[in-house]
Image (cartoon, grey):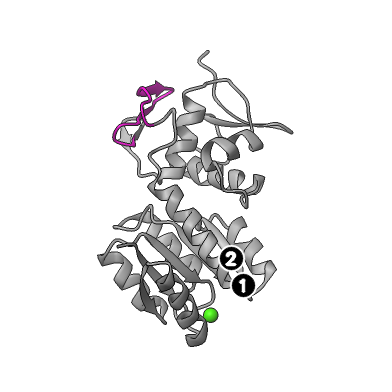
Amino acid sequence: MTRVLVVEDEKNIRDLVCLHLGLEGYECVPVGDGKEAMALAAEKPFDLIVLDLMLPGVDGVTITRALRRHGPNRDTPILMLTARREESDKVMGLDSGADDYLTKPFGMRELVARAAALLRRARAPLASPQSDGRPVDIHGVELDPARRGVRVRGNAVDVTRQEFNLLYLLASHPGIVFTRERLLSKVWQEQSFVTGRSVDTLVKRLRKKIEVDPAEPKLIVTVWGDGYKFADLA
Ligand code: CA
């Protein structure tokens, strides 16, 4: 059974979302409060989390960041609900860790379609070539695709699935420039809603985890006007 945590303080929206997810055969766990959602998600794994941005107590971005750090929902896709277009922009710009967003008011068919797309992506095996990829060891960055393990300068680093996929793609092709479009198609695959900015956001997050000084990145290098590359072997 596919379990979806639905965090929304407006009861009518929460009920409607759960009704439609239920019609798709998903088990909906409705919660109206941010703190309760955090406690629940710290305990139990979900297949998908539908998360309102503006909640009493703890907001959606704070919840997402907490979930992404550790716990059973570190890789669970998060669909953020926002009240306005500007909020959506902020969510996606803010390296929040959400995978997609919907701006209110949204249609239930749209919600169901986005939910299904996120679930499909989460269930797909790691995109090739990662799934059968060879380990990579370059410039102090060691990547083990079989375990999705990352060590940087000898220390284990926690990364999400998306972060791993992006890092692996770049690090297994040192010196090769990848445009944002190419990275989008490789790392996000069929997710047409993501933009070049999603790539920038993910790179920023990765740099914080692997670079000595994220402001002066030496491993994931920006190629102005083009995209990104992993530092050359030389
Ligand atoms: Ca709200």
Q: Which range is magenta?
A: 131-149
SS under mark 2: helix
In the rendered image, the vertical position of residue 65 relative to residue 211, given as above or below: below
Dot 2 amino acid type: Glu
In the rendered image, the vertical position of residue 26 relative to residue 173, given as above or below: below
Q: Nearer the viewer, residue 83 or 115?
A: 115
Question: Where, quadrant-wise, is the N terminus in this rendering?
Answer: bottom left
Ligand 1 within 8 angstroms of badge 2 C-beta: no
Q: CA distance from mark 2 to mark 1?
A: 7 Å
Q: Dot 2 surroundings within 10 Å: few (below 14), some, or many (20 or more)?
A: few
Q: Is residue 157 magenta?
A: no
In the rendered image, the vertical position of residue 233 relative to residue 229, given as above or below: above
- Residue drawn at x 54%, y 23% is 231
In the rendered image, the vertical position of residue 91 relative to residue 157, given as above or below: below
Q: Nearer the viewer, residue 4 or 230?
A: 4
Residue to which mark 2 is pinned: 110
SS under mark 1: loop
- Residue drawn at x 37%, y 67% is 26
Q: Position of residue 184 (x, y in %)?
A: 59, 40
* Among the 4 quarters of the image, the one containing residue 19: bottom left
Dot 1 amino acid type: Phe
Residue to which mark 1 is pinned: 106
The answer to whether residue 212 shows anywhere in this view is: no
Count the numbered circles shown.
2
Report the side of 217 relative to 123 (left or right). Answer: right
